[in-house]
Image (spheres, rainbow, N blue to C red):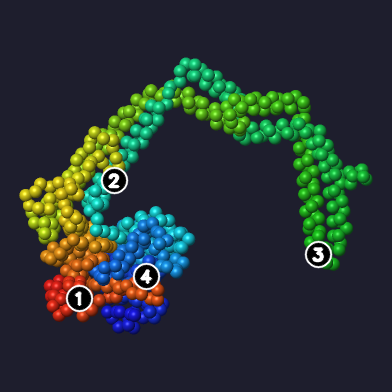
């Protein structure tokens, strides 16, 4: 089954690799330059045997009967974004599940920068691939390069934002609140200044803590360490000198055997009149003299001559070395006693300091440092206390600048969210972001502040904590309002290259005019980028640029899921079903009216 908005021949290359029964969804490709998911491929995942989806920018809804498997697309993208995998996700009877997603990136998108820094960039596209095997092993690739799950999570967080029905719960976490306020706020320099000032303060604080934990030496300890240092200074040798001393001791201890060997070698290599010990070099030169007249008779004789000549020369050089070694060796018993005495002293000190004899020099330096630190401990602590005070002052100054920028951003975002709430059945509602300075606490890399999200869903009611004063449906709508407001502020500041937005039934619990408003908001969030939404609401589906229907069927004894792009009559019928549970003349008329109003 192939469904296309253009002639089949235009896309023959796109789906020629697929089997005849493989559903391939091809949207007319008009890329706007924004970051978007271009292609999603699913193999043996849950109850999906094989699915290929080609997607386009704008607002796409995913619809179907309850339990049809609409959220499987969201689950697949979640795994491609780095969520931990489970073997239960592999289709029954298959050895592995395979997922891949191809994204097109804007040049300035953070994901593009991440790929460049990781040396995985491929112009303006990004291919994520993940394989989950029945053995429990999960593997991942980015543009063909094997990566860790952490790397996949880092990049996935820049490419995709997935929002579930309980999206508001995330905002109860401090990290998410900082992300909401700071991400795209336009004050990255202020954030960086606070982070750098914190790093300097933290380094001073840690060193001061270490020094305060180090005790100064009392008089007895100091005298002992100074005595040990003196011993080491008198005896300790560099590692190279120790090794040379050990080598000399072995040579002196075996002196008689060494001299006998050198004398024999010298006689054998020297010119000798002793017929019993003919000189090796002399014999080799005789061979040369014998063979030289015959060199022209056979090339191999020339080769043999070259080798013999070289051997004769080497024997002469060896004789000279042996003679020098014999003349240089001092085999006097006095020298042996001196060397062994020196080594004995080194071994005694090595046992005392519990180290190898070639590590005594290191032990000496450590003792000297300990003595020096003890004598200067108080002055170093005093100096670090001044440095810490200055670092805290610098941090406080940087933090003050950041607080001003945050306060301005919080006011603008609160006002923008409040405006969006008015069209979501929360007339007179308010949204506010309060910043509570925590100057009496320890510095943190992001500043000392507590962020509180306050909301009132009704006129005349004072704003209170987000989770305590809003219902589930209101919380979902407030989350959408925040997304739209954030997008508008980023557009105004010229910083709008967002990740792909994916909403999984965030419109649950709403209907009527509110559902129309939610659909309009989701379409607004997409803008010229890309938003996907799993929905049961006809009002939301009618406002989408594209609609995909998910259907579940039985193939033999196995369940299977397929996806179909809807257009024209097929889309009208699906929206009619969503409106009344069945397709009738009245529901079709209502569906056409919704689609017409959405396009206006």
Q: Identify the element where label 1 is drawn.
A: loop
Q: Residue at x 43, y 58 (%)?
A: 147
Is there CB contact under 8 Å for labels 3 and 2? Answer: no
Q: Nearer the viewer, residue 258 or 172?
A: 172
- Of callouts 3 and 2, the N-terminal one: 2
Tell which circle, 1 or 4, labels the residue nearer the N-terminal end: 4
Q: Nearer the viewer, mark 1 or mark 2?
A: 1
Please give the residue where the numbered disc 3 appears in the rendered image: 300
Against 34, is 441 above or below? Answer: above
Looking at marks 1 and 2 on the same chain, the residue that comes earlier in the sequence is marked by: 2
CA gap, disc 1 to disc 4? 26 Å
Precedes in sequence: disc 2 or disc 4? 4
Query: Looking at the image, which residue sits at the far front?
Result: 557
Question: Marks 3/2: CA distance?
Answer: 78 Å
Q: Residue 54: give x, y in percent of width and height.
A: 32, 72
Residue drawn where x is 36% and y is 62% of the image: 80
How far from the left and from the top, in percent, is residue 501? 26, 62
Q: Where is mark 2, residue-wise?
A: 192
Q: Nearer the viewer, mark 3 or mark 4?
A: 4
Q: Would you call the spot at circle 2 few (<14 residues within 10 Å), some (14-19), or many (20 or more)?
A: some
Check the image and name the residue furthest to the right: 275
> Which of the 4 image quadrants contains residue 331?
top right
Mark 3–mark 1 Cα distance, whole angstroms, equals: 101 Å
Residue 131 lies, with reference to residue 18, above or below; the image says above
Label 4 belongs to which residue?
Answer: 48
Q: Residue tagged by mark 1? A: 582
Q: CA distance from mark 1 to mark 2?
A: 57 Å
């Amino acid at each position: 089954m192939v469904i296309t908005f253009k002639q089949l021949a235009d896309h023959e290359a796109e789906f020629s690799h697929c089997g005849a029964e493989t559903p391939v969804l091809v949207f007319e490709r008009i890329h706007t330059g924004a970051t978007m998911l271009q292609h999603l491929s699913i193999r043996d995942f849950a109850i999906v045997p094989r699915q290929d989806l080609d997607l386009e920018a704008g607002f796409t809804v995913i619809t179907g009967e309850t339990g049809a498997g609409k959220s499987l697309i969201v689950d697949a993208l979640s795994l491609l974004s780095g969520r931990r995998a489970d073997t239960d996700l592999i289709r029954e009877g298959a050895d592995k599940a395979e997922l891949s997603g191809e994204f097109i990136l804007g040049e300035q998108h953070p994901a593009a920068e991440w790929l460049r820094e990781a040396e995985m960039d491929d112009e303006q596209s990004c291919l994520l691939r993940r394989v989950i095997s029945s053995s429990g092993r999960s593997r991942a690739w980015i543009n063909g390069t094997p990566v860790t799950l952490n790397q996949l999570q880092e990049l996935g967080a820049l490419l995709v934002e997935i929002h579930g029905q309980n999206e508001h719960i995330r905002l109860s976490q401090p990290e998410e609140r900082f992300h909401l306020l700071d991400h795209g706020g336009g004050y990255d320099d202020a954030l960086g200044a606070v982070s750098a000032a914190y790093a300097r303060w933290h380094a001073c604080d840690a060193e001061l803590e270490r020094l305060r934990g180090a005790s100064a030496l009392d008089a007895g300890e100091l005298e002992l360490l100074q005595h040990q240092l003196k011993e080491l200074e008198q005896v300790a040798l560099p590692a190279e000198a120790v090794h040379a001393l050990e080598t000399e001791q072995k040579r002196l201890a075996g002196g008689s055997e060494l001299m006998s060997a050198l004398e024999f070698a010298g006689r054998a290599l020297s010119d000798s009149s002793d017929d019993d010990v003919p000189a090796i070099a002399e014999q080799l030169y005789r061979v040369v003299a014998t063979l030289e007249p015959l060199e022209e008779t056979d090339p191999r004789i020339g080769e043999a001559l070259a080798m013999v000549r070289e051997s004769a020369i080497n024997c002469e050089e060896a004789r000279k070395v042996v003679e020098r070694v014999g003349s240089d060796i001092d085999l006097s018993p006095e020298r042996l006693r001196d060397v062994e005495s020196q080594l004995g002293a080194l071994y005694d000190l090595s046992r005392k300091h519990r180290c190898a004899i070639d590590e005594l020099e290191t032990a000496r330096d450590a003792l000297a440092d300990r003595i020096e630190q003890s004598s200067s401990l108080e002055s170093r602590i005093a100096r670090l206390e001044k440095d810490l005070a200055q670092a805290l002052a610098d941090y406080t100054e940087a933090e003050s600048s950041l607080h001003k920028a945050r306060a301005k951003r919080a006011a603008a975002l609160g006002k923008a969210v409040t405006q969006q709430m008015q069209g979501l059945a929360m007339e007179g509602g308010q949204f506010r972001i309060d910043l509570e300075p925590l100057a009496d606490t320890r510095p943190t890399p992001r500043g000392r502040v507590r962020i509180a999200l306050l909301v009132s869903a009704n006129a005349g009611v004072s704003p209170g904590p987000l989770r305590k004063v809003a219902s589930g449906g209101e919380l979902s709508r407030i989350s959408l309002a925040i997304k739209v407001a954030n997008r508008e502020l980023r557009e105004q500041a010229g910083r709008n290259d967002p990740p792909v937005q994916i909403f999984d039934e965030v419109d649950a619990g709403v209907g009527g005019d509110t559902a129309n408003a939610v659909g309009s908001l989701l379409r607004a969030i997409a803008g010229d980028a890309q938003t996907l939404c799993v929905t049961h609401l006809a009002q939301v589906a009618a406002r989408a640029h594209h609609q995909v229907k998910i259907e579940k069927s039985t193939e033999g004894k196995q369940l299977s899921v397929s996806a179909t792009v809807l257009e024209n009559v097929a889309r009208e019928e699906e929206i009619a079903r969503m409106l009344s549970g069945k397709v009738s003349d009245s529901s079709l008329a209502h569906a056409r009216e919704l689609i017409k109003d959405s396009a206006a």
